[in-house]
Structure formats: structure tokens, C-alpha cells
Amino acid sequence: MNGDKSSGDRFGGRGGDKDKDRDRDRDDRGRGMRRSGGLGGKRRPKFCYYCVEKNEKVDYKDVEKLRKYISERGKIVPRRISGSCAKHQRQLTEAIKRARFMALLPFSLD
């Protein structure tokens, strides 16, 4: 075809290297410190604060307790990180949204 293409690929790319890159990406997938938990050690057992305290309802006016369930970016912390049960996580989400609407909590913490 053209004499300026050195690799011999008719599209001008590095044809043989694509397979190597794809294999390298496939090998790295799912491995690393993120999966293993980092440095090791025992994990602290997670528990639902509201179940331990025998609270039936999550109050949107209790801003100090709600702040524990908001990240530094202002997002609601997921259940797998906060350790709350499904019932109280739903109540927490609703209470945080109500507190934001009533201007007790900010929408973002930028």
C-alpha cells in the first residue's frame, strides 16, 4: 500500500500490541490491595447504631447523628460502609433528605 507505514498493518496502528494490552488489562482486573483489604488485620464488626440504641425512628432534626452518615463530599454513606441495617438505612436516607430540604444540612460540602 503506502510505503510510509512501517508496521505492515493496513490501518496504520500497532496491530500486534493490542492483544498484549488486552491481556495485560484482563490480568490486572480484580486484583490488588482494594480486594484484599489493604494491610490486613482484623476488621471491626459493623453494627447498626439505631438497632443497638433501640431507636425505632430516625429523626431528621438530630443533625449531629445524621452527620455521621454523610461523607466529606456531602454524599450519603452507603450501608456497606456505615454498617446500618436496611430498615434504618432507608430511614436515614429519608431523614437526610428532609434535613437538607429544611436547610439543617447542606446539599454539598465543597
Image: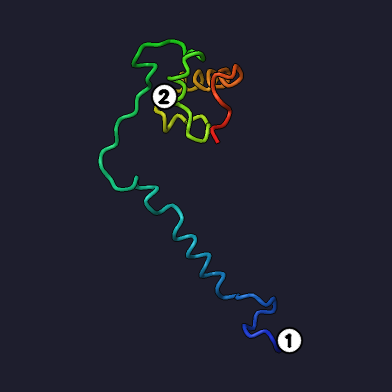
Residue of label 2: 84
At mark 2, the secondary structure is loop
Three-letter amino acid code at the position of disc 2? Ser
* Rendering coords of residue 42 (x, y %): 26, 38
- Counting residues from the start of the chain, the first of labels 1 and 2 encountered is 1
Quadrant in the picture for the N terminus:
bottom right
Number of numbered discs on residues: 2
Residues at circles 1 and 2 in contact by the CB criterion of under 8 Å = no
Disc assigned to residue 39: none
Where is residue 43 shown, x and y percent of the image? 29, 36
Q: Residue furthest bottom?
A: 3
Compared with 88, 13 (above or below) is: below
- The residue at 46%/23% (across/down) is 86
Mark pair 1, 2: CA separation:
65 Å
Q: Residue at x 67, y 77 (%)?
A: 12
Query: As drawn, is 31 to the left or to the right of 100?
Result: left
Assign a secondary structure to mark 1: loop
In this view, the residue farthest toward the right is: 1
Question: Residue under circle 1?
Answer: 2
102 vs 15: above or below: above
Characterize the local packing of mark 1: few (<14), some (14-19) or many (20 or more) Cα atoms within 10 angstroms.
few
Image coordinates of residue 37 in percent, x first then y, are 34, 45
Amino acid at pointer 1: Asn
Task: Give me the residue at 44% from left, 20% from top.
Answer: 64
Please tell me which residue lies in front, 82 or 36: 82
Tell me: 1 left or right of 39.
right
Quadrant containing the C terminus in the rendered view: top right
**Observer-nearest of 26 and 60:** 60
| Residue at x 34%, y 28% (from the top left corner) | 46
Seen in the picture, residue 46 relative to 41 is either above or below; the reply is above
Q: Residues within 10 Å of mark 2 (few under 14, many from 20)?
A: many
